[in-house]
Amino acid sequence: MKKRLAIIGAGELGNQIAHLTDQNDEHEVYGFFDDTLSVGSILGKHKVVGSTKEIISFFDLKLFDCLIVGIGYHHMESRKAFFERFSERIPFATIIHATCFVDPTAKIASGVVLYPGCIIDKNVVIEDNVLLNLGVIVSHDSHIVSHSFFAPGVTVAGFTRIGECCNIGVSTTIIDNVTITDNVQTGGGSLVIKDIPLAGLYVGQPVRLIR
């Protein structure tokens, strides 16, 4: 029997996750919890069932089995806050599209979403509530800390560590043996060739801090 999945956030990202879930053999979408749309609003095939204040009461009534955060990179702190708010009470799902390759030695935590075409190499660690968009490659022995968000086409070479709440922009390339601190954002097409010890927005080839 499929587990009933509730999604926090009924915006575009939440709808993308619902679409992925509809292709998943392990879960079915129960509905969205959203604080901006009215209960009963229909988004694609699914509807808003309540506000985030109602999540625990719905779970206690056994109306759904697990959660996922469907809030995007514009609200990184909210992504983190919702996961931490509910993870001690409610199981979080892990959604991995069937076209992904995940090496058996990789460790994938709860609340993680892997979009189609992701490649996760040997000994990779992906912590809680990380989202990897289309075609992301994470090479051997790399470590992605909780609540980070990767845009399509990101490539991470081996022995790299990426900190908490990082927003890695589309087609960013990160070479091997690099450490990136928490709360770093990279622009599209960025090239990271050395450690990033300070939070901020980095762009360019190689990247430079712009704010």
Image (tube, helix red, strand yellow):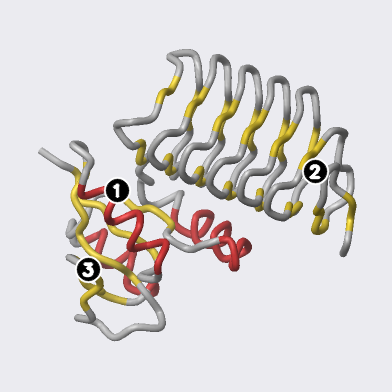
The quadrant in which the N terminus is found is: top left
Mark 3 touches mark 2? (CB < 8 Å) = no
Rendered view: 108 above or below 61: above
Question: Of callouts 3 and 2, which one flags the residue occurring earlier in the amino acid sequence?
Answer: 3
The quadrant in which the C terminus is found is: bottom right
- Residue pictured at 53% horizontal, 19% vertical: 121
The amino acid beneath tag 1 is Leu
Res 110 → quadrant: top left
Within 10 angstroms of label 2, few (less than 14), some, or many (20 or more) residues? some
Residue 47: percent from left, percent from top:
21, 72
Give the Cα separation between the discs numbered 3 and 1. 12 Å
Within 10 angstroms of label 1, few (less than 14), some, or many (20 or more) residues? many
Q: Which mark is residue 20?
A: 1
- Residue pictured at 25% horizontal, 59% vertical: 60
The amino acid beneath tag 2 is Thr
Give the Cα separation between the discs numbered 1 and 2. 30 Å
Residue on which disc 3 sits: 44
Rendered view: 114 above or below 149: above
Residue 188: percent from left, percent from top:
68, 53
Q: Nearer the viewer, residue 113 or 52?
A: 113
The amino acid beneath tag 3 is Gly
Give the label, 3 or 2, closer to the camera: 3
Give the label, 1 or 2, closer to the camera: 1
- Residue pictured at 89% horizontal, 51% vertical: 208
Residue on which disc 2 sits: 181
Q: Secondary structure at mark 3?
A: loop
Give the Cα separation between the discs numbered 3 and 2. 37 Å
